[in-house]
Structures are given as structure tokens and as C-alpha cells.
Image: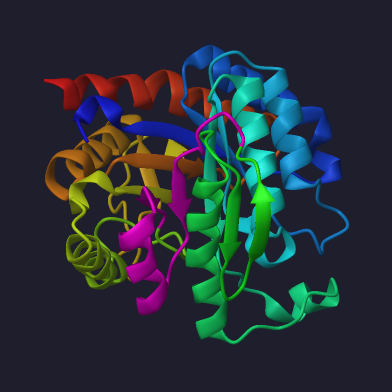
Amino acid sequence: MSRSDVVFGFGAHSGFGDLPDLMRMVQQADRDGLDLFSLSDHPYLGERLDAYAALGFLLGGTRHIGGLVNVTNLPTRPAPMLARTVTSLSALSNGRVVLGMGAGGLWDRITDMGVPRQTPGDAVDAFEEAIVLIRKLSGGGSPVTHEGRHYQVRRIEPAPVAAPPVWTGSNGPKSLAATGRVADGWIPGHAADWRSERYRASRPIIDEAAAAVGRDPREIRTIYNFPGRITDRSLTATRDHDGRWIGGSADQWIEELTGAVLEHDASGFMLFSSGHGASDLTTLARWAQEIVPSVREAIAK
């Protein structure tokens, strides 16, 4: 991955009450040159828009920006149908889709949707198998028969377009190893960043698993979800007592993110604002217009 491939995006609120601002934010980000917006996927919450319905609608109202469900709640979206969804969205948007994948987290709520509970090990096995199957059902070719442990399809024609890149929200060792074997990117959980113990302990598992199957670990991106304030003045401390990034001035953001790329091989950043409405729009504008262009310029030197 070259430095020119570093992506910048933001996480959008996707409740029904956020509708007045949601399209406006995504269209503003599109005009300002951001690469991605992301939506969460919690189908058991009635106040949330369906992530994939919203993703398609927002991509249809933009021209350049890509979209990501961050991350797909796989147990509620069976892999063969998910393959149809993401390849269709990719075709309709001219490739502006990334497939975010998770093994499932809030199992008490997932089972409330009528989905059978899986053990953690089975959930990760299904997650890896799903990624493999989605790729089989993409890119054209002969009809696919897949007799797996978790998924079975018979004589299903693949979509004629390629599957989108797959980024995972893996946390445990088994899931991280699956990311190394079959995924294109990793989003560290719990908003862990490039200086966190979670990153330092987890990324080597991905790299070792990738190398074991003959992959170049450098091809697997690390993309960070992170919160943080953009302040008018520099902060004395930009991290809290646990070492987590809390924000700072535009100059402090630029220095930190540039270092993350050049010193820690970061390949993407998704900003999550803690505000709503006008506050969100202001933060997004400063992110896209002040910080991102300066980081892009710095890492290109």
C-alpha cells in the first residue's frame, strides 16, 4: 500500500431522528473530497435505519465518496444474500463500496431477531467462511456450489462484478487470524488507535496468519475508528490518562495523523464526532477542509 492510498472518512449517525442531517453531511463530505462515510449495523434497534438501505440511498445521492457498513452484523445477514447486496451496490455506485464484516457481538440482541446463538468459535468460523463464499459469488464465472459447515449453496451464478474490499472488525485471536488469511483490512475494536496495546498485541497475529498462507501482510490495511474534538486552541495533553487520543487543534491533529502514517503504517482514519446537527457539520467541515488536505500533503512528501 502506498501513502497515496491512505483513506479518510467519517462515521455518521443513522437513527431515524438523524435523517434531516444525514444526507446533508454525506453530500458535504462528498464535495469536500473525503473518501468514505460509515454507518453502524444494529438491526435489532428500531430507532436505527437499516444500514444497507441507508447506504444505497446515500450512495445514490453522491458522486465520489464511498460507503461502508462499519461493521456488517453477519449473523442477521446470511452470506449468500450479503454477496448479492454488496455486488449490486458496487455495480450501482461504480465501485464505491467497502464490505465491513463482523462475526457478531451483542448475541442477546441478535437472538432476539430469531437468529440461533453461536459459540464464539462457531461465529468466527462462519465469519471466515462467509468472506470466502462472498468472493466465490462475485466476479463472474461458472455456477457455484459450496458445501461448507455454515453455508451451502448449489449451482448459484456469481454476480458479474467483483466483491468489494473486505475490512473486518476482528478482536479475538481466532478472528484476527481469519483477517490475516482472507480480509483486505482491519478496523481495531473499541476505537483503539496506533499507540494502543490492543493494536500492538493484535496486529502481529494478523501478519503471522497472512504470511502463513503466502500473503504479504502489508497488503492488509489498518483503518482506525476514533473519536476526538477539534479545538480552536492547542491542548496541553492530546491523550487521556489511559493514552487514548482525545483531540486537539488542527495542527495537533495533523502532526498526530501524519506520524501515524509515516511511523505506524496507518492506512485510514474514520472520524466519529460526539456532536449532532450543526456541531457535527462544523466538525466534519474542519476535518475535511483543514486537517485531511494537510495530512495528505505531508505524507506525500
Range drawn in magenta: 159-187
Q: Looking at the image, which residue is at 67% across and 47% down? A: 156
Q: Quadrant of residue 97?
A: top right
For residue 5, above or below residue 190: above
Along the line of sight, the residue nearer the viewer: 117 or 33: 117
Q: Quadrant of residue 277?
A: top right
Point out residue 31 in the picture as x, y percentages from the top left corner.
55, 12
Point out residue 73 in the picture as x, y percentages from the top left corner.
65, 60
Point out residue 251 in the picture as x, y percentages from the top left corner.
28, 31
In the image, 32: left or right of 42? left
Q: Looking at the image, which residue is at 35% across and 35% down? A: 249
Q: Looking at the image, which residue is at 24% across and 45% down? A: 219
Question: Which part of the image, by quadrant, shows the N terminus?
Answer: top left
Along the line of sight, the residue nearer the viewer: 89 or 272: 89
Q: Residue furthest bottom?
A: 119
Along the line of sight, the residue nearer the viewer: 4 or 175: 175
Q: Looking at the image, which residue is at 68% across and 42% down? A: 84
For residue 161, above or below residue 189: above
Asked if one can make out residue 15 in the rendered structure from this viewpoint, the answer is: yes
Point out residue 158 in the picture as x, y percentages from the top left corner.
60, 40
Asked if one can make out residue 226 in the rendered structure from this viewpoint, the answer is: no
Q: Is 164 a magenta residue?
A: yes
How many callouts does the rendering have?
0
In the image, 88: left or right of 196? right
Q: Is 167 a magenta residue?
A: yes
For residue 179, above or below residue 81: below
In the image, 140: left or right of 13? left
Question: Which part of the image, by quadrant, shows the C terminus?
Answer: top left
In the image, 43: left or right of 175? right
Which color mode does the image show?
Answer: rainbow
